[in-house]
Amino acid sequence: LCIDCHTTPCGLAGVLKWSVIFQPLPLIAVYRIFLRNILQLQKKHKKCYLSLLGQCGSCWAFAAVASVESAHAIAKGPLVRLSEQELIDCDTQNYGCNGGYRPYAMSFVRKNGLVKEDEYPYRGADHNECALDVNSTGRVFIHDYRTLSPNEEIIADWIATKGPVTFGMNVTKPLYSYRNGIFSPSKEDCEKNSLGSHALIFVGYGTDSGGERYWLVKNSWGSRWGQNGYFKLARGQNACGAANSVVTPIIEQN
């Protein structure tokens, strides 16, 4: 395992390259509308919340929580907004605003569950102690989690049949000014000009009119960034290492 361990402009840290952030803005319904060349997940995966991180390197927590929210909505419904701050304060295997491992976060959720966000709201900072009410009810648990093979066809199949997944990538300067189209960073730019690590959510995939394949990605920089907070990332070239660290929760249906 590699850790996201020092804060970056992306709100992330270290080598694993993950992040997702906060601000409850329900923007898009995601699940399976599977066409031959286009997959827009807008039917059954329910809604995803878009977020805005603040000055805390807690993207590992936001990535984990966003994926748990989606998995829970698919398996059990309805969509429930869950607490990132619980992970930041209470997951002792990770490092709060200084970074962490998504697998450790998933392990925490499997054991302890997550309360609703309004019960343990986001502060954008380390609380330094866990303030979780041990008597709180209605926690959301996962049954397990899985790290997927770094194979984009396998990842696409998982998304099509089971739902959104978290992933990590290096962030380069052009991503900050993304507005539309397919973001296709060069290997050299990703390796030599990375501004830090970022974790996001794959919510779908498709092929544009020119035959270029892409991932539909939920970012966490607010709805004014990109295409209502989303962007298209080049698919099939492991752009900035996007396929290297795909982690997803598993919640069994009733």
Image (cartoon, grey):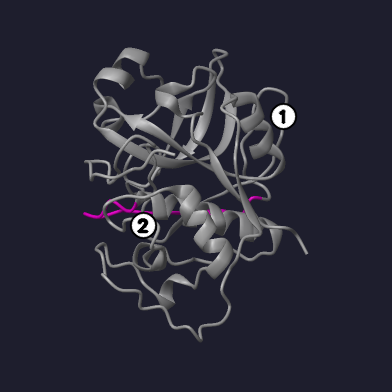
Quick one: which residue is furthest to the right in this view?
254
- Residue 235 visible in the displayed image: yes
Q: Classify residue 23 by image quadrant.
A: bottom left
Reading the image, the residue beneath label 1 is 35
Can residue 56 be found in the magenta stretch?
yes
Question: 231 or 144, which is in the foreground?
Answer: 144
Reading the image, the residue beneath label 2 is 22
Rendered location of residue 93, percent (x, y): 40, 58
Vertical comparison of 248 with 56: above or below: above
Rendered location of residue 34, percent (x, y): 71, 34
Q: Secondary structure at mark 1?
A: loop
Vertical comparison of 152 with 117: above or below: above
144 relative position to 199: left or right: right
Give the quadrant of the N terminus.
Answer: top left
Q: In front: mark 1 or mark 2?
A: 2
Vertical comparison of 144 with 166: above or below: below
Q: Which residues are magenta?
A: 45-58
Estimate how packed mark 1 is, as few (under 14), some (14 to 19) or many (20 or more) residues with alpha carbons within 10 Å: few
Q: Secondary structure at mark 2?
A: loop
221 relative position to 84: left or right: left
Residue drawn at (70%, 58%) of the image: 75
Q: Mark 2 belongs to which amino acid?
A: Phe
Residue drawn at (64%, 45%) of the image: 163
Residue drawn at (28%, 27%) of the image: 172
Question: 107 or 64, which is in the foreground?
Answer: 107
Give the quadrant of the C terminus.
Answer: bottom right
Separation of marks 1 and 2 at Cα, in angstroms: 32 Å
Estimate how packed mark 2 is, as few (under 14), some (14 to 19) or many (20 or more) residues with alpha carbons within 10 Å: many
Q: Mark 1 belongs to which amino acid?
A: Leu
Rendered location of residue 251, percent (x, y): 67, 57
Quick one: which residue is furthest to the bottom in this view?
135
